[in-house]
Amino acid sequence: MKSYKIACIPGDGIGKEVVPAGQQVLQALAAAQKDFSFDFTSFGWGGDWFRKHGVMMPDDGLDALRGMDAILFGSAGDPHIPDHITLWGLRLKICQGFDQYANVRPTRILPGIDAPLKRCTAQDLDWVIVRENSEGEYAGVGGRVHQGHPIEVATDMSILTRAGVERIMRFAFRLAQSRPRKLLTVVTKSNAQRHGMVMWDEIALQISKEFPDVRWDKELVDACTARMVNRPASLDTLVATNLHADVLSDLAAALAGSLGIAPTGNIDPERRYPSMFEPIHGSAFDIMGQGLANPVGTFWSCVMLLEHLGENAAAQRLMQVIEQITADTSLHTRDLGGSATMAQVTQAVCERLSGAR
Ligand code: ATP
Ligand code: MG
């Protein structure tokens, strides 16, 4: 029987609650499917690790993860540690260390969810945002000089490389091609950013020639936010730079009903390294330790993890159960206007998976 080695990194805040819930669900699924199992290893990296060791994860941390089949991540963020340390010291270190250059973010309105766009049905909103995850605005290049003086200068450079843009465009076109509508929107800002984004547009046109069956268009990122609200059905797959996609995907998650539901995968499409799956929400310290966290974003991330492992039947089964759960409003957590606890939702998912209900 196939056994998958899964690294679990709960991280901070509600990450410590939702990741164990995800493990419980994966375990229940494996027990029900009977043709594979999971071998979990947990890593206590994050804010607590930083307080003890001065770093968010050990220097040889990537080596410990290298042999894994996949990583299930919670969140990195701590109110007492600056955000750039928590982010760069853990999540981005893994994403960049393992060249997980494609960040994939599906968004759908699940059954039973009261989404904010009243004219919008579940058929109208079915998107996947592909975020360039290795360079762009978050390349980490820049600096500050003359700190504190009136002449102080601070720069954050957006780095786009031909190789980096070609590979994410090709990934996005291929993903669009695999979806029923074969429709891709390339998000840009080449009217105002005259170098990198112009190359981005040129490469989109170049790669589009490899995919004659994919319909595609270009949209400015600002106009794209309005289009997501006004004409959601005109979008299917989107590809955008690191910063643009970061913003668009929070909007997408909110339009689908809650930040607590949305999943994401940080993927190395070439499979040289393990890919990492996580809910898109952060550490949410305001609700930590109260059992209020919505675990659905983590469960949906587990679906993506299973798809990445090639366990498609199991992935479909878990997604089906997630949709049964969201359709039952008595199992909605507080962020969805309900009063169910994370433990109740998790138990309901496990019971359905094991056929007990
Ligand atoms: P970070 O700094 O790590 O990004 P954050 O405190 O900004 O964390 P987010 O996760 O970005 O928190 O979420 C913003 C708010 O949305 C939270 O304060 C929380 O109230 C709510 N929220 C986020 N995720 C969930 C969830 N899974 N279940 C319920 N509510 C959530
Ligand atoms: Mg946040």
Image (tube, rainbow, N blue to C red):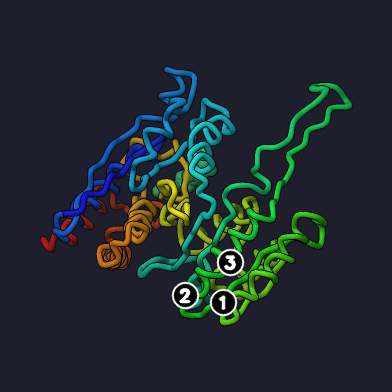
Counting from the top left corner in percent of width and height, residue 53 is at: 44, 18
Q: Quadrant of the N terminus?
A: bottom left
The three-letter amino acid code for the residue at tag 1 is Leu
For disc 1, the neighbor class at 10 Å (few under 14, some 14 to 19, many from 20) is: many
Residue type pointed to by label 2: Arg
Q: Quadrant of residue 297?
A: bottom left
Instruction: Check disc 1 and report the residue beneath it.
Output: 183
Toward the left, the furthest residue is 356
Q: Furthest residue to the right?
A: 151
- Kind of residue indicated by mark 3: Leu
The residue tagged 2 is: 179
Picture disc at residue 222: none
Q: Is residue 191 above or below residue 242?
A: below
Badge 3 is on which residue? 238
The residue lying at 62 percent from left, 70 percent from top is 185
Q: Is residue 86 above or below residue 206?
A: above
Between discs 2 and 3, the one toward the N terminus? 2
Residue at (17%, 61%) from the top-left corner?
33
Q: Secondary structure at mark 2?
A: loop
Which tag, 3 or 1, sits closer to the chain's start?
1
Q: CA distance from mark 3 to mark 1?
A: 9 Å
Q: Count all numbered tags in the image, as a single digit.
A: 3
Residue 194: in sight, yes or no? yes
Q: Residues within 10 Å of mark 2 (few under 14, many from 20)?
A: some
Is ligand 1 within 8 Å of the beta carbon of the residue shown at mark 1?
no
